Amino acid sequence: MAIQEARTETALDDPADPSRRRLLAGLLTAYTASLIPWALAQPAPQADRGAFAALSAILVGRPSLDAAQATRTYDALVTDDAHFPTDVQALLTLINQRHIDPLQLQATLDSEHSPLASLPRRIMSAWVLGVVGSSEGARCVAYESALNAVIVADVLKPPTYAYGSYGSWTAKPV
Amino acid sequence: MAALASADIVVIGAGIVGALVARRLAQQGASVLILEAGPRLDRGRIVAAFRHSPFKGNWMAPYPPSPWAPHPIYVPRDNGYLKQAGPYPYPAEYIRAVGGTTWHWAAQAWRLVPNDMRIKSLYGVGVDWPLSYEELDPWYQEAEEILGVAGADNTGSPRQKPFPMKPVAEPWAMHRVRERLAGVYPVVANTVARNSRGYDGRPACVGNNSCQPICPINAQYLGINAVEAAEAAGAKVIPNAVVYRIEHDVQGRIAAVHYYAPDKSEHRVTGKTFILAANGIESPKLLLLSASSKYPNGLANRSGAVGRHLMDHPSTSLTFYADEEIWLGRGPQSPSSINTLRDGAFRSQHAPYRLDFTNISQVLNVTNDLIKEGVYGAAFAKQLRWRAARQINVKNVLEVLPNPDNRITLSSEKDAMGIPKPEAHYAIDAYTRRGAEVSKADFARIAELMGGTGLRYSAEGSFANNQHITGTLSMGNDPATSVVDAFGRSHDHENLFVCGTGVMPTAATMNSTLTAVALALRTAEHILPAKQAVVANAAGDREAGLA
Amino acid sequence: MNAPLRYLVLLGLLVAVLAQAADNPDATLLRRGQYLATASDCVACHTSPGGKPYAGGLSIATPVGNIVSTNITPSKTAGIGHYTEAQFSDALRHGIRADGKHLYPAMPYTAYAQLTDADVQAMYAYFMHDVAPVDTAPAPTRLAFPFNVRLLMASWNWLFLDDQPFKPDPGKSAEWNRGAFLVRGPAHCSTCHTPRNLLMAEQSSRELAGGAVGTWFAPNITSDATSGIGNWGTQQLVDYLKSGHASGKGQAAGPMAEAVDNSLRHLTDADLQAIAAYLKTVPPRHDPADTRAVDRWGGPSAEPDVARTALPGDADTMSGAQVYDAYCASCHQARGEGSFDGGLPPLFHNTATGRTHTDNLVMVILDGIRWHTDDSGVHMPGFAHELSDRQIATLGNWLLQHYGNPAATVSVKQVRTLRTGGAAPHLVLLARLAMAAIVLLLIFAATWLMRRRKRHAAKTF
């Protein structure tokens, strides 16, 4: 059940780094640029990695993605599937051309039986769960820095990590 | 055949029950040998294995089975060790390793209520136990003091002496649930083998929220603590010893057990008294495997009851969003329950149940939901926080009646050591299903009191397994219908005892471990009475270097 | 009842009341005595593990051998029940037992010498009336020659003992004087924290500059801002003394945890403030190896998760990051940042990882931190059982590199030595060598004298 939410203001309000904008300009149209918060940690050195960074930023919707984590995640996804870079480019192009809202993206891909339908979930799983691959091929590439832990890090520690001294959990979470 | 080993007492299975029986007998001066099919484990490695696992929701991930002592695994796929004959699956999870399955329990350490042991006389269903609650009470107390059980007095089970520790500090989330349900449902603190203060050289809980699959800091009592205590008392543990046959003499006394080492070399161990404590599936399996010409149906099985009356505590549940932020995941995993539906005249009509509130962090579940729903973009973080802050789950823990057709048998398939795999035949009957149906009204009411939205009931007709493997070695007074007597002694073999959850003839509604331990301590006393009062020797364990 | 009889009864009652008062010292005196006994931490040494309070029996390892603490309960047969107040005072402040024999300064009478007569009176009353007598005597102390010659202590005392009670400094505040009295007297901080000379006497010119306590070392707590506690605020010092830790500073472990647990946390806030105020004025001693304040090293780890690969089968080949992840991170967190409430402390900005002398880091990994007198018990588990010497060395070096002073190191040999109780003390060996040398010298001298006499005798014939 998805809670309908108004789209939040984009990061166009943030001051944009001209060098990053130049780098990614080739990959994006005005539409996708409007979806990406611009505070990417570092410019990506290659077009493939750049496309991955851009698509990740769109899907995950986070203001910044750690460059080292992006590299590891990208490498793991490519190892898992050699077609990955091509698919990423294709999906980014698709989003550009058709101005697909991230919240509508999966439904769109599914209804059209797109060959790219599994891609968003794979990227999301890698970033927010820290898991790449599935079934016997699944492996963990991140845990504490998986984004689902980061997003709630002010309130919760990931399981196995202590919350605090005995009884500290009785207080209302701030 | 390799070198002989021998001891007064031979225990099969180094789980919490086998180890505590061994400890008590070793303290009385007996020589005790514990044979464990699986390996020794290291807590730090288990913690690391959990964090490495791509299947964080699978609590068996940090416990890969050993090739020589497999246990059931279902994720990413069923390893086919526990065969399912149906009609309903019995997907039990257990750990064959030194320390046993309580490496990953939530430490719920409940007593029964007195009526649980007399449901035949009182309600006309199930069977009566061959002993009373009053007889078990002092053993419950001893078990609670060994484990270090923290509890409140208002949980429904009578007691003579206080708990060793006050209840574990209540998480904010449970505090709110308790407040909002007050007057309609009394929410009580779970009695748990979890430290609310330093106890027996182990620290108090610091809220790692990973009780299952592993407590990283030893704040909850695990089977491994029992094993260490047994070893400190003088018991010897042989790991990686897969017992495959129990040998009897011409009179039917147990003479020896045979085990494989991982290289399949055969070893024979003799003793005077034998205690089978290998869990409610592996123990009956071993008895059936040990069939001989004198005992064609397996050992201890003149009644034909070995492996039968398989029970568990099935669960159905409701998940919903509360109308306030409560943030499950802060503190221990299983803090609170509603216990007032465990007993009553209705038990003649439908199963009783406990209602269990989880405090397991909802972040993983919510993340999986959001990915499945295709929630991408800035909405992801917003929804993750919104849902993780509000999502609550309440489940029932239902009683299953003993049914001889629900049973563990030997499969025709063999494992890597050439030993037949166990096979589960199981069904959930109308008595239990009616209980589940009735509990839906409670679920709905609870959601209402919490201002719940987004109600999601577990799938109709689908029950989760709770790994409380009971009934397969039922105790009773009548040798024609039970496997062991009220002290766990086999009706058929004078020097064979059985300990574990398998001896419980009915399941009631409460997690079975404490009852199994209490019964086992009573068995140990019966085998070798204490010369002076033996209470939980916490000070002794400390001096023995466990602190 | 007639008048004279009434008078006699009243007199009798009065005498009885007075006699009662003499037998039962007033509650204030007893409380004061108990407070001083707590501040002096008598119970820590005079109680064996699991034993009755003050019944003695704790074997204390010292460089001269094991010294067993005595029973100081008021038992008449096994304790000090027969001591007069003067004998109690002599033992406490001069190191002389009731039978005239000397005590070893393992009993810190050199510090307790600061106690005033009024203090002694209160403590005597407490020990005689409020401590339960225990009639079991512990094993006597047996040291190797020459240290079993207690009379030697007389010379030692003559050389080193300042046996005058505390005299307040009129130029300083009442709070400073109180702090000075507590630190130099009952709390006997210098017994551990002041370095000692070859004859095991404290070097008073280097007050509180650091000293060894078995396998632990008591660090520099002078007012030096880099090597000592000079950059600690008064409240941080008070927090540390009261709770055993101060955020962003450090935690009490080993013998200091025991001191906090048994003694310091029971002192009044005013007394703790006084101790802090005094400590801030102790002359600074700087260790040139400390290039930065010992609590200012490190920061949260900037690295992403430890690579999520399977652990090696051979535990000794685990990397520092892997050992940390498996055994430490659950409490100290993935980036070393500690729990939300700081109760499970961060490992950076922590004296535990900031010192160049790393014995305490190894010891706390081996032994953990354990309190006995309150409900919390295990504050940190010890890992002696789980981790090998190599794993602890690997972990220690990784912690120092990532969260602490990267110039400090831990060696496998160091871990092994500390685990087994520390380096063998040299003092006994040195003393024996010295004696052997003297005996040889005497034999040589005697031989030479005899030869000379023979030659002389031969010559005279």
Image: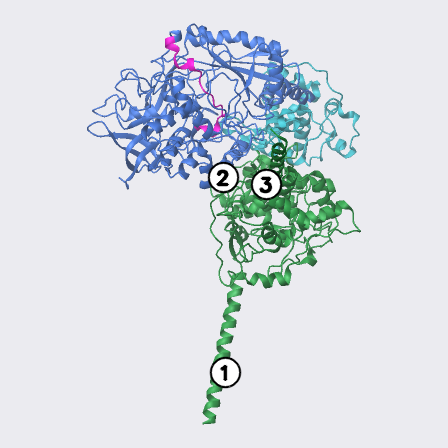
Chain colours: A cyan, B blue, C green
Circle 3: element type = helix
Q: Which residues are magenta?
A: B101-121
Image vertical order of residue C232 relative to residue A119, above or below: below
In this rendering, position of residue B65 left or right of residue B33: right
Per the model, the C-alpha gap separating discs 3 and 1 is 67 Å
Residue B193: mark: none
- The residue labelled by disc 2 is B547
- Same chain assignment for discs 2 and 1: no
Furthest-left residue in this view? B250
Q: Is residue C320 visible?
A: no
Q: Given the image, what chain letter belongs to the residue carrying mark 2?
A: B
Q: Which SS class for mark 2?
A: loop
Query: Number of labelled discs?
Result: 3
**For the residue carrying disc 1, how many other residues have a C-alpha within 10 Å: few (<14), some (14-19), or many (20+)?**
few
The type of residue carrying mark 3 is: Asp
Tell me whether the residue at label 2 lies in contact with that at label 1, contact meaning CB atoms closer than 8 angstroms. Answer: no
Residue A88 or B183: which is nearer the viewer?
B183
Residue linked to disc 1: C449
**The furthest residue to the bottom:** C461
Counting from the top left corner in percent of width and height, residue B485 is at: 31, 21
Q: Which residue is mark 3?
A: C23
